[in-house]
């Protein structure tokens, strides 16, 4: 149960739409660092109220087609971003390189736009997500996995199948139609247009 006191303007997504699936990857070891990230202590997905309302609209459209959103990350405390920055400086720690950034030197992950030291996530109105099929519970094939850092994850990457392009395009269209903007380097990353806290980088931890 997610019950921590949140700053004004933030909500638990499950209080707005409990049908949206979530898998907070930075709470687990299954992420590009290979460890739980600082600031993630509970499986509670937090966003600004405006973001939750917009996601609920997307979910309502998807549900009619037997689909659902699956969210991997949303509000991200600044201490988590600081953890990424600290991790990036330890160049010999390449535990998860094979799965997450096989073709990009670790020293380039920030320069090439795959991780930010001032992240929209920390402002509470950015989300990393995909679409799943409700019948199979499987993610639609987007041509690269979540947080795969490489050109293959650029939304306009050409060398993927027609079906993978169609799935990426569908996700992008439905998000853009519901007041989100895309990101040039990652097909899964979207930020709410007119976000309520465009200049504030929050640092409260995610705990219940
Ligand atoms: C780390 C990845 N999931 C992501 O969100 N990247 C962008 C650039 C960010 O860190 O804001
Ligand atoms: Zn992101």
Image (cartoon, rainbow, N blue to C red):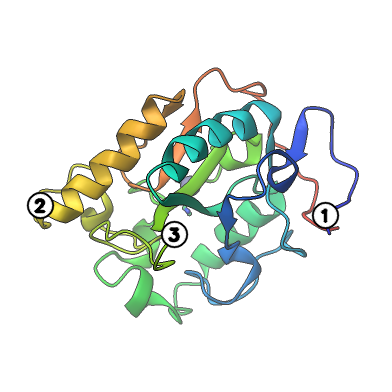
Tell me the mark number nearer the camera, choosing from 3 and 2. 3
Determine whether, in the image, residue 58 is placed left or right of residue 207: left
**Residue 92 appears in the figure:** yes
In this rendering, the answer to whether 142 lies above or below 171 is below
Residue at the spot of label 1:
2
Residue carrying label 2: 162
Q: Which of the 4 image quarters holds residue 161?
A: bottom left
Q: Which numbered disc, 3 or 1, marks the residue that appears first in the sequence?
A: 1
Q: Are marks 3 and 1 in contact (CB under 8 Å)?
A: no
The residue at which mark 3 appears reads as: 134
User: From the viewer's perspective, is 202 left or right of 63?
Assistant: right
Per the rendering, the mark at residue 119 is none
The one of 47 and 138 positioned closer to us in this rendering: 138
Q: Which of 58 and 85 is in front in this view?
A: 58
- Asked if residue 170 is positioned above or below residue 128 in the image, the reply reads above
Q: Earlier in the sequence, mark 3 or mark 2?
A: 3
- The image quarter in which residue 159 lies: bottom left
């Amino acid at each position: 149960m997610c019950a921590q006191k949140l700053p004004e303007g933030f909500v638990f997504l499950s209080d707005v739409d409990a049908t949206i699936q979530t898998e907070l990857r930075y709470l687990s070891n299954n992420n590009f660092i290979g460890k739980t990230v600082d600031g993630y202590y509970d499986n509670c997905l937090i966003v600004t109220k405006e973001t939750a309302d917009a996601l609920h609209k997307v979910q309502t459209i998807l549900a009619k087609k037997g689909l659902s959103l699956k969210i991997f990350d949303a509000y991200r405390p600044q201490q988590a971003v600081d953890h990424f920055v600290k991790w990036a400086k330890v160049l010999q720690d390449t535990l998860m390189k094979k799965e997450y950034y096989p073709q990009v030197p670790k020293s380039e992950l920030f320069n090439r736009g795959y991780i930010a030291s001032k992240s929209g996530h920390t402002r509470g109105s950015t989300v990393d997500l995909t679409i799943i099929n409700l019948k199979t519970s499987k993610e639609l094939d987007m041509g690269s996995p979540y947080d795969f850092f490489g050109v293959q994850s650029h939304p306009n990457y050409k060398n993927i199948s027609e079906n993978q392009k169609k799935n990426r395009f569908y996700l992008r269209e439905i998000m853009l139609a519901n007041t989100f903007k895309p990101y040039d380097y990652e097909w899964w990353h979207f930020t709410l247009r007119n976000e309520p806290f465009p200049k504030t980088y929050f640092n409260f931890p995610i705990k219940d």
